[in-house]
Amino acid sequence: MKTVIPLLLLCFFSLTSCFEDEDDTPIETSEISDFVWRGMNRFYLYKSEIPDLADDRFTSLNSSDYFNYLNTFETPDQLFNSLIFDRQNVDKFSWIVDDFFALEQNFSGTSRTTGMELYRAFAPNSDAVIGIVRLVLPGSDADLKGLKRGAIFYAIDGTPLTETNFGALLEPERFTLNIATYNDNGTPNDSSDDSITPTETTITLEKTEFTEAPIFSAEVFEVQGQNIGYLMYNGFIRGSENELNTAFANFRANNVQQLVLDLRYNPGGSVAAMAALASMITGQFTGDLVQRLVFNETSQGNNRDFNFIDTLPDGSGAINSLGLNSLHVLATGLSASASEGLINSLNAYIPVTHIGSNTVGKTQASRTLYDSPDFSRNNPNPSHTYAMQPIIANGINNDNQSVPATGLVPTLPFFENVFNLGTIGTLDEPMLARAIANITGATLKTSQKKSKVVHETLPLIDNSDFRPHEGGMFID
């Protein structure tokens, strides 16, 4: 993102500090800070918890006490962060950016990335840190270079990995992975002598501007006389409803009777896309509530319902719904926001079997606020590119239930074994196999290998893939 650098000189405006943009045009700090305060005062979900956001906090927004207050903060970011309620426990999800163009690209699924997503783990029987590739995006540089899910690396550019240097080593635009192999020493059912063996193999990756397809895999399996659909959906990207609808048309054509929806790496996204997907899964609840967004005490008039629909949001055609009366969902500590909202919403109508681990626990929705007369994308202030993505509403289902802060608890707990990830979209991939075994009543055979994962809920590590603000649940 663009860096805003404080000018080391006195600004000609009283009670105002300045910033210099990339084109050397001075930007008034108080001008941006005024946008920050006004936007948070109007929309922030936890406004009543922040005394400085009270409507009567200042004599007026043209008063000296207001501008004096704004100028106690050196940067707009400092002001924004001072207005967040209980960052550690409650609002972990609001953020501010100085380049809304990059933010918009991110929400559309575009970012600078090598195309790999990672787990970080300890090597077996060791405290050495290693990286394990959990996903490779089709068509990305990592894919073109032959990197596969489950690949292990012990160093980057020859530097051994540690818990503290992992992210920093992945920051450059170009870097080389030093590949290792897993060695069970001839005892596949005994992990006590397992180890990681460094190799001479290296893979050099480069970051490129890349747009991720939200549907990673869509398959139909015939198992014990049942047609089972499988959909791995990695982001509730706005505009992806038509692509989803095409996948569901294929499910319908193949008479899919059971569906496994894979949201294990899905951080969330558009509420509208969530409502559309819920409608494709079911179809018998058209017009009923999927999710209600409830705003702060002074903005109750903005409360908004998202209902089950039978027509695509762009009006291009009918929803291809399956009319299912049950659903299996794969969800983990990397599943958040709209992913959680979908599970929570469908739970009010049909049995949802959640396989995996506790989800993130983010039931709130956010919205991008621009420095414009109505905080929309129309006519933003041309002197800067700051934008905010604050939490502005809480999502509840038809039973008036929200997702708990501790996350949704799985029906069937299942943790990925980082040394036995399997191939996504195949019947022997362990997590999918667990779901199908539950559907068919079969006995599940699992690997005995164990792994010590440093952070089961670790975000995408490669800084090109490290998108802590990607997704979330946002209002279009």
Image (spheres, rainbow, N blue to C red):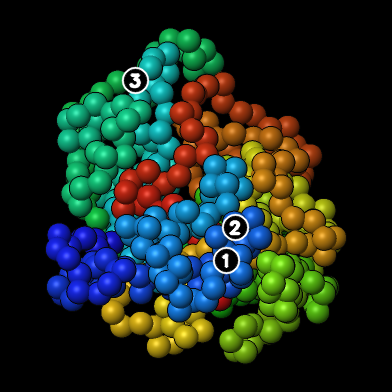
Residue 205 in percent (x, y) is at 22, 48
Please state which amino acid type lies under the numbered disc 1: Arg
Q: Residues within 10 Å of mark 2 (few under 14, many from 20)?
A: few
Residue type beneath disc 3 = Ala
Compared to residue 65, the image places residue 49 above or below, namely: above
Q: Is the residue marked by circle 3 packed among few (<14), some (14-19), or many (20+) residues within 10 Å?
A: some
Report the front residue among 333 and 323. Answer: 333
| Residue marked by disc 3 | 128
The quarter holding residue 53 reads bottom right
Image quarter of residue 247: bottom right
Q: Secondary structure at mark 1?
A: loop
Q: Which badge, 1 or 3, is on the more N-terminal residue?
A: 1
Q: Nearer the viewer, mark 2 or mark 3?
A: 2
Q: Residue at 59% of width from left, 56% of height from top?
A: 50
Q: Residue at x 21, y 60 (%)?
A: 6
For the N terminus, the image quarter is bottom left
Give the residue at the far top of this rendering. Answer: 193
**Residue type at the position of mark 2:** Pro
Residue 335 placed where, x, y %? 58, 50
Cα separation between marks 1 and 2? 7 Å
Pointer 2 or 3: first along the chain: 2
Decide if residue 60 is in sight here: yes
**Residue that carries the numbered disc 1 in the rendered image:** 57
Q: Is residue 290 left or right of residue 424?
A: right
Q: Position of residue 134 (x, y in %)?
A: 44, 42
Q: Residue at x 52, y 12 (%)?
A: 190
Badge number at residue 51: 2
Locate the C terminus by quadrant. Answer: bottom right
Regarding mark 2 in the picture, which secondary structure is present there?
helix
Instruction: Give coordinates of residue 157: x percent, y percent.
Output: 17, 35
